[in-house]
Amino acid sequence: MSKPQQPVTPLSRTRVVIVGRIAPLMAGRHTPLLVAIDGASGSGKSTIADMIVEATGATLIHSDDFYAGQTSDAAWDARTPEARAADVIDWRRLRAEALEPLLAGRAAVWNTFDFERPRADGTYPLKERPTRCEPAALIVMEGVYSSRPELADIIDLSVLVDSPIEVRHGRLARRENDEFLRHWHERWDAAEEYYFSSVRPKSSFDLVVTN
């Protein structure tokens, strides 16, 4: 009896497109390949990254693990959108603790910030239990700001997940409470707009997919 075929969906087509770009880059390669899946909040990066990992057996890194949780609400609000975009991800720690070990074929260990334990000033502690990530031939890194220029020299394929703003905001509204989301939009919408218009515009990515 033949196995029933899985339905073809826009997401599955996106997976095929991305895996199709990865395959020739992996051919004959002897060092790990790093793919960055970037996009504005609510664009569907995590879902697409999970599909790529399932299809390829890649190791997955969430750049949100390296959110600059030591910065207070007052300090964020005193920054310009440009400064927020520059500071929101601790890319130095991301590079040193996660990317460089994995690209060298070693396991990576890091402590993520603990989103469940916010302090009164809006800062977050790091989790006591570290995250461990085993090396693999393919490394997928997903998150807003994951393809920032400071990491360009080690990223082999940069992917932008593009999605209309009303779709993105609708997804965020379904998963966050109204009060949190109101403050989040006030602080981060302008930073993301700056990042995707001036730092990493659509034309700067190797591949753009629509979700």
Image (cartoon, grey):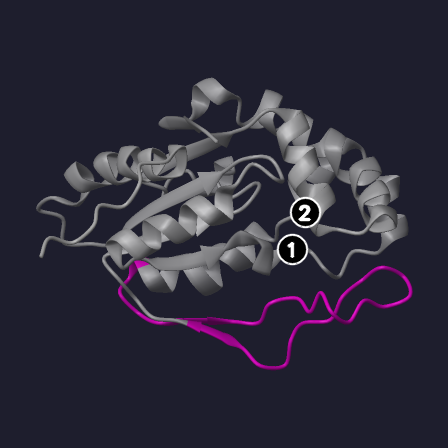
Q: Which residue is pictured at 64% across the width and 75% down the height?
A: 127
| Contact flag, marks 2 and 1 (Cβ < 8 Å) | yes
Membership of 45 in magenta stretch: no
Q: Which residue is pictured at 73% across the width and 40% down the height?
A: 84
Q: Which residues are magenta?
A: 103-132
**Within-10-Å neighbours for mark 2: few <14, some 14–19, many 20+:** some
- Specify the quadrant of the image occupied by residue 59: bottom left
Residue 96 position, x and y percent, is: 47, 60
Asked whether the viewer can see residue 210, the reply is yes
* Residue occupied by mark 2: 88
Residue 147 position, x and y percent, is: 48, 39
Q: Name the dominant secondary structure of the magenta segment.
A: loop
Membership of 113 in magenta stretch: yes
Q: Is residue 201 left or right of residue 42?
A: left
**Within-10-Å neighbours for mark 1: few <14, some 14–19, many 20+:** many
Question: In the drawing, what numbered circle is on residue 159?
Answer: none
Q: Amino acid at mark 1?
A: Tyr
Q: Is residue 73 left or right of residue 203?
A: right
Q: In the displayed image of the protein, which residue is found farthest to the top?
A: 203
The residue nearer to you, when weighing 11 against 205, is 11
The residue nearer to you, when weighing 76 against 39, is 39
In what element is the residue under mark 1? loop
* Residue 150 vertical position relative to residue 1 in the rendered view, above or below: above
Q: CA distance from mark 2 to mark 1?
A: 6 Å
Q: Which residue is pictured at 51% across the width and 57% down the height?
A: 94
Q: Amino acid at mark 2?
A: Val
Q: In the displayed image of the protein, which residue is found farthest to the bottom?
A: 129
* Residue occupied by mark 1: 67
- Specify the quadrant of the image occupied by residue 68: bottom right
